[in-house]
Image (cartoon, rainbow, N blue to C red):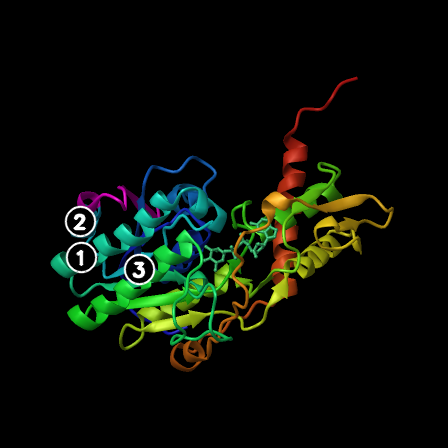
Amino acid sequence: MPTSSPKRVLITGITGQDGSYLAELLAERGDVIWGFVRQIPQPGSWIDPLLKPAGGKPPRVKLIVGDLADEGSVRRAVGSILPEEIYHLAAQSHVPQSQLDPESTLLVSMAGTSYLLDAIDELTPESRFFHASSAEIFGDAVSSPQNEKTPLSPRNPYGSGKAFATHLVRTVRDSRGTFAVNGICFNHESPRRGPNFVTRKIAMAAARIALGRQDSVSLGNLNARRDWGFAGDFVKAMWLSLQAEQGDDYIFATGVTRTVREFCEQAFQSVGLPLTWSGVEKEEVGLDDQGIVRMRIEPEFYRPLEAVQLVGDASKAAKELGWKAETGFNEIVAKMCAADLDRERAQIENEPEKIG
Ligand SMILES: C[C@H]1O[C@H](OP(=O)(O)OP(=O)(O)OC[C@H]2O[C@@H](n3cnc4c(=O)[nH]c(N)nc43)[C@H](O)[C@@H]2O)[C@@H](O)[C@@H](O)C1=O
């Protein structure tokens, strides 16, 4: 990766999957990192090792409490930290949840992005701004694979909020000259993924079933396809995009899709419980080698409108940033299952012994 002098950096969404990997990457570079958080995280957060490093070393991350839906607190954060780089990663990013609660999803995606861009314009016009956009802006995509020029066609509130913010970033870049980047991120996973996303749900279930702590798992559409990469690779792309000559839009993706079914097969295989399938579509089940049902279909996990052909063309990021997704599908699944096996085993060790 290219070198550059340490920076003052502000990250929204720092306690999440991407925020924590990014903070680790920037801490290694020696950057001075601030996390904008709604509340101080409970112990056990992914950024604990940066907040309280081992051996009594000084914290690598400082926190500033505020709310992205409150313009005043956003201005105060930017005005007091005077960041050279801002990574805006915070979002309510679960698609079904955005259908249940569009308002708060849209507030963070739309108002939060707008307040940050206004604060930069007024207080720190030299700051470089990264917006974590999403493949969901393409929703019902008119062409495949999608690139930076593909028209936006979101199909749910989450995608709509991200589409608005993506447009806003483009407009502000053109009209005010702000160094602003849209990183249009396709699905990216890791052991830090929240358990309501399908990959982590499957990895956790496979680990728990293999250790006898759960009988089976219920899923929705097994034939849904996604372009799944590794979150640790994606945060490198985010950083690289802010080291470029000028702000721009980039697709971050692997260019390869897999089905939910393939993810299941690979996950169960990696915990030593290969699955076979029986039945059709919504009646389908996954069986282990003893014929025990380990995976069922539950209609509640089907989506009313599925994003159909989302696969990214990241050739611009490759050409201009020298970035490509390095971690393959099988490696991502293996990492996730191994981490969940470890976590479950640690929990078993800490459980009080049952007597009688
Ligand atoms: C790019 C985009 O990527 C992510 O959004 P997502 O693709 O909606 O992620 P997911 O893991 O919830 O669903 C993936 C697929 O899996 C299918 N699926 C089947 N059965 C279950 C199931 O039981 N649970 C879930 N959650 N999905 C299921 C589901 O129908 C869908 O086709 C976010 O990071 C988002 O923030 C973002 O930006």
Which residue occupies 42% across, 82% down?
319
- In the displayed image of the protein, which residue is found farthest to the left? 122
Q: Quadrant of the N terminus?
A: bottom left
Q: Nearer the viewer, mark 1 or mark 2?
A: 1
Residue 75 has which mark? 2
Element at label 1? helix
Q: Is residue 72 found inside the magenta-colored segment of the image?
A: yes
Which residue occupies 17% across, 70% down?
175
What crowding class fits label 1: few (fewer than 14 Cα within 10 Å), some (14-19), or many (20 or more)?
Answer: some
Element at label 2? helix
The quadrant holding residue 184 is: bottom left
Is any part of residue 57 visible from this angle?
Answer: no
Instruction: Please determine whether, in this image, residue 36 is positioned above or below residue 262.
Output: above
Residue located beneath label 1 in the image:
118
Is any part of residue 355 visible from this angle?
Answer: yes
Residue 165 has which mark? 3
User: In the rendered structure, which amino acid carries the disc numbered 1?
Assistant: Asp
The quadrant of the rendered image in which ligand 1 is seen is bottom right
**Marks 1 & 2, CB-CB < 8 Å contact:** yes
Front residue (pair 52, 160): 160
- In the displayed image of the protein, which residue is found farthest to the top? 356
Q: Magenta residues, as a range?
A: 58-73
Mark 1: C-beta under 8 Å from nearest atom of ligand 1: no
Instruction: Please determine whether, in this image, residue 311 is positioned above or below residue 55.
Output: below
Front residue (pair 330, 84): 330
